[in-house]
Image (cartoon, grey):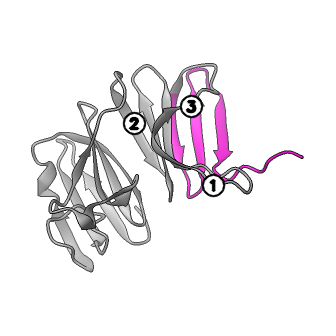
Amino acid sequence: VTADHAILITNDGKVYGHGSNHHNQIGLYQVYPVQSYVEPVTFLNAFKIIHAAINDSGTLYLSYNGQIFASGKIMGIDTDNYNDSMVMVPSFCKERIVSIACGQTHVLLLTDNGDVYGYGDNDIGEEKHYQQKPEKLQFFKENIKAIDCGLDDSLCLTQNGKMYQWNIKITKSP
């Protein structure tokens, strides 16, 4: 849920959206300024969706099989410029994706073997980087079992119960 829109997923993997769709962030076939009632996201009917990660302008959907779909403006994708309401994000690793999370301008992906991939904004002091493709985060010494994102920060929980938190805007040390 964001201030603008919400995504609901049923136990059988069907998806419904409500609220603002001005960037096609819900993934409906037509871009409605505001969706005043709950609408099924029919593009995903053929897939069992297990999770959604949303920000103000886009939504990522994760299927049971590890496929990722994107709608709106997210991960460098803008479905306002496509004829479809949604696009499938190409696979980038051999492991199955089991969890997704997104901040306003960055995304985390968790694999079934506990690896974490990230992409999007990665500001370091005065330098700005936009990671176009998911890159494995190398700084974890143990497997991760859960991920989440805030607006500009990220969280990971290890198999041993340690919590890591970091912000995408890192200040360089002098």
First to last magenta residue range: 145-174
Q: Nearer the viewer, residue 131 or 18?
A: 131
Q: Nearer the viewer, residue 105 or 103?
A: 105
Task: Return the disc, 3 or 1, that comes first in the chain's sequence.
Answer: 1
The amino acid type, in three-letter code, at marker 1 is Lys
Judge depth for marks 3 and 1 and give the one in front.
Answer: 1
Assess disc 3: are there few (<14), some (14-19) or many (≥20) residues with their C-alpha within 10 Å of its C-alpha: few
Instruction: Give the residue at mark 3.
Output: 137
The amino acid type, in three-letter code, at marker 2 is Ser
Indicate the secondary structure of the residue bearing disc 1: loop
Q: Position of residue 161 (x, y in %)?
A: 62, 26
Is 18 situated left or right of 132 in this image? left
Task: Indicate the quadrant where residue 17 lies.
Answer: bottom left
Instruction: Give the residue at mark 2.
Output: 99
Marks 1 and 2, Cα distance to the nearest angstrom?
Answer: 26 Å
Q: Nearer the viewer, residue 45 or 129?
A: 129
Instruction: Give the residue at mark 1.
Output: 128
Assess disc 1: are there few (<14), some (14-19) or many (≥20) residues with their C-alpha within 10 Å of its C-alpha: few
The residue at the point 64 percent across, 34 percent down is 163
Indicate the secondary structure of the residue bearing disc 3: loop
Q: Are marks 1 and 2 in contact (CB under 8 Å)?
A: no
Q: Are marks 3 and 1 in contact (CB under 8 Å)?
A: no
Q: Nearer the viewer, residue 121 or 41?
A: 121
Marks 2 and 3, Cα distance to the nearest angstrom?
Answer: 15 Å
Q: Position of residue 10 (x, y in %)?
A: 21, 48
Judge depth for marks 2 and 3 and give the one in front.
Answer: 3
